[in-house]
Amino acid sequence: MITLQHVSKTFPARRRSPAVTALDDVGLRVERGQVMGVVGPSGSGKSTLARIVNLLERPSAGTVTVDGVELTTLGAAELDRARRGIGMIFQQFNLLDSRTVLANVELPLELAGVGRRERRTRAAELLERVGLGDKLDAHPAQLSGGQRQRVGIARALAPRPKVLLCDEATSALDPVSTASVLALLRTLTEELDLTTLLITHEMDVVKRACDHVTLLESGRVVDSGALGDVVRRPGSPLATRLLPPPAAPGGEQVVEVVVGTTEHDTVLTDLIRLHDVHVAVLAGSVETLGDQRFGRLQLRVDGTPGQVRAALDHLATHQPAVDDAATGALADRPTDRTLEGALA
Ligand SMILES: Nc1ncnc2c1ncn2[C@@H]1O[C@H](COP(=O)(O)OP(=O)(O)OP(=O)(O)O)[C@@H](O)[C@H]1O
């Protein structure tokens, strides 16, 4: 688990450059088994955040706790030990070309003083696990970008870390390699019960690989949560980036809802069953976010004014992403069809 509390980081002024506050009172919590994506524009503090999680950068204020240990209180030797529990994956892989793939994965174990036989066995197992069991004796230059990143992942996992930090891990890869590396990161997080923090500037990476997301802007957290919660949250700056509004004429007869597509998401069936209204889907967009699918739908709800009002109240209670403006207009001003219903 990773917990950051009230973390700030200011880089002091130097000659002609003024001081920079890269992180400003950041709070973050990532549980075991979760993949948290950290997104934000260039310069928003993403890399600084990643470096602070393993204390390559010391925060100016606040605490960093990883797997129950408050890193900010540790001395150099203890910190070294704690860092072995945090694997890092980099955009440029950082592999040694002079070494074979197997020897690259063995390297952190060599540095930790693990014996030769155990090193070999563990490195070979990990390479098998990331799909490179037949490349042990190859050199990095003989591999594709996606394969090199798999070596990087195996190397990061060699010391059996509990936490994985990935800084733009797929930014140098083509779309096919990106998809397979992200799928691998998800699988490994689940199978090894890791806590994974994925720094990225691509929303597509979040959609594919993450179950949680945090948006940084100018060093501050401006949005954060489980993908399924964020897409439903009214006013969330991430919601429409994760699930774009469908291209459809809006208007006072139209209400917008975000629904999951699992059998547990009964908002629409309840609406029709409990309030006896007619619901027409005018437009919709559907996205896969992590391992779930979500739809942003524009609906027209028809029935008697009472039914429509009750149905919209129901939506407002059970579906917080209802477009309030549209709801108000529809509830206050019955449409022709709802008036017809009332007069019938
Ligand atoms: N060592 C440093 N000294 C001074 N300023 C720094 C240092 N490292 C980062 N900064 C500044 O802190 C701010 C945040 O930088 P950071 O690299 O964390 O952003 P980022 O979101 O990762 O950006 P990018 O997506 O472009 O990599 C920027 O204004 C940057 O110039």
Image: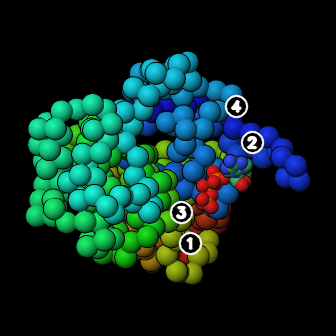
Circle 4 SS class: loop
Within 10 Å of the Cα at label 4, are there few (<14), some (14-19), or many (20+) other Cα atoms?
A: some
In the rendered image, the residue lying farthest to the right is: 16
Which sits earlier in the primary sequence, circle 3 or circle 2? 2
Q: Nearer the viewer, residue 40 or 84?
A: 84
Which sits earlier in the primary sequence, circle 3 or circle 4? 4
Would you say the beta carbon of the disc 3 residue lies within 8 angstroms of ligand 1? yes
> Please, what is the three-letter code of the amino acid marked with disc 2?
Phe
Q: CA distance from mark 1 to mark 3?
A: 37 Å
> Please, what is the three-letter code of the amino acid marked with disc 3?
His
Q: Position of residue 288 (x, y in %)?
A: 34, 64
Residue at position x 60%, y 38% in the image: 57
> Please, what is the three-letter code of the amino acid marked with disc 4?
Ser
Mark carried by residue 201: 3
The mark lying in front, picked from 1 and 3, is 3
Q: CA distance from mark 1 to mark 4?
A: 52 Å
Q: Write down the residue under mark 4.
A: 60
Q: Nearer the viewer, residue 153 or 245?
A: 153
Can residue 331 be seen here? no
Q: Position of residue 90 (x, y in %)?
A: 43, 56
Q: Position of residue 236 (x, y in %)?
A: 59, 54
Tell me which colouring the rendered structure shows.
rainbow
Circle 1 SS class: loop
Residue at position x 68%, y 35% in the image: 8
Q: Write down the residue under mark 2.
A: 11
Q: CA distance from mark 1 to mark 2?
A: 52 Å
